[in-house]
Image (cartoon, rainbow, N blue to C red):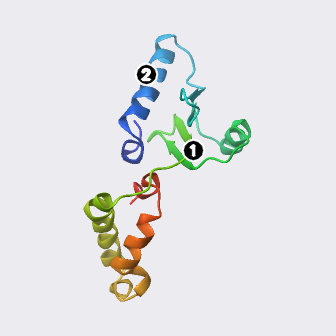
């Protein structure tokens, strides 16, 4: 019952891990409140049975003292489950094939839908945006 963004922004490997953990908890009839860490400590996931005001502050207090390089927050469509993922370490930068095949076409659609004025703005030219995309981690551009 997670939103489409959850499946688009996270890899299958990550959300399968979440599903396995949730399955285990449901089998034991436990509340789905847990913290998952990847073996290399480069991913930390908080899964909570509900979303409420102040939840993010609680999670941030439990994170390691180093700053995450990626953060994704998701709430199930029925607001019963909150899954928040934090990543650490070097993020892979976007490559030419990704930029031209996926990110630029998506951004171009957005620019055209928003306003033709943006199409004449040098900051939104294909060349400027491609240069910007080259400096962005793939995980950031997956939001496009």
Where residue 107 sits, quadrant-wise, is bottom left
Disc nearest the viewer among 2 and 1: 1
Task: Look at mark 1 in the image and give the residue it sits on.
Answer: 89
Position of the N terminus, as image quadrant, is top left
Relative vertical location of residue 14 with respect to residue 75 in this rendering, above or below: above
Residue 43 horizontal/vertical position (percent) = 55, 36
| Residue drawn at (53%, 29%) of the image | 38
| Residue drawn at (36%, 46%) of the image | 8
Residue 26 horizontal/vertical position (percent) = 48, 17
144 relative to 64 in the view: left or right: left
Compute the Cα span from label 2 to label 1: 24 Å
In this rendering, the count of numbered labels is 2
Relative vertical location of residue 45 with respect to residue 70 in this rendering, above or below: above
**Label 2 element class:** helix
Where residue 55 sits, quadrant-wise, is top right
Please state which of residues 121 and 134 is positioned toward the viewer in this rendering.
134
127 relative to 123 in the view: left or right: left
Where residue 49 sits, quadrant-wise, is top right
Relative vertical location of residue 55 with respect to residue 100 in this rendering, above or below: above
Crowdedness of circle 2 by 10 Å Cα count: few (<14), some, many (20+)? Answer: few
| Residue drawn at (31%, 58%) of the image | 98
Relative vertical location of residue 118 with respect to residue 70 in this rendering, above or below: below
Residue 105 horizontal/vertical position (percent) = 27, 67
Position of the C terminus, as image quadrant, is bottom left
**Label 1 element class:** loop
Residue 72 horizontal/vertical position (percent) = 52, 47
Task: Look at mark 2 in the image and give the residue it sits on.
Answer: 20
N-terminal of the two: label 2 or label 1? 2
In the picture as drawn, the residue positioned furthest to the left comes out as 101
């Amino acid at each position: 019952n997670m939103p489409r963004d959850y499946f688009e922004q996270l890899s299958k490997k990550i959300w399968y891990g979440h599903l396995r953990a949730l399955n285990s908890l449901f089998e034991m009839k436990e509340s789905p409140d847990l913290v998952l860490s990847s073996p290399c400590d480069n991913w930390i996931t908080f899964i909570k049975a509900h979303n409420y005001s102040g939840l993010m502050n609680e999670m941030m207090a439990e994170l390691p003292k180093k700053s995450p390089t990626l953060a994704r927050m998701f709430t199930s469509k029925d607001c019963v489950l909150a899954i928040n993922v934090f990543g650490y370490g070097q993020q892979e930068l976007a490559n030419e094939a990704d930029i031209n095949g996926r990110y630029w076409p998506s951004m171009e659609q957005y620019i055209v839908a928003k306003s033709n004025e943006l199409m004449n703005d040098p900051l939104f030219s294909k060349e400027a945006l491609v240069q910007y995309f080259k400096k962005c981690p793939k995980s950031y551009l997956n939001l496009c």
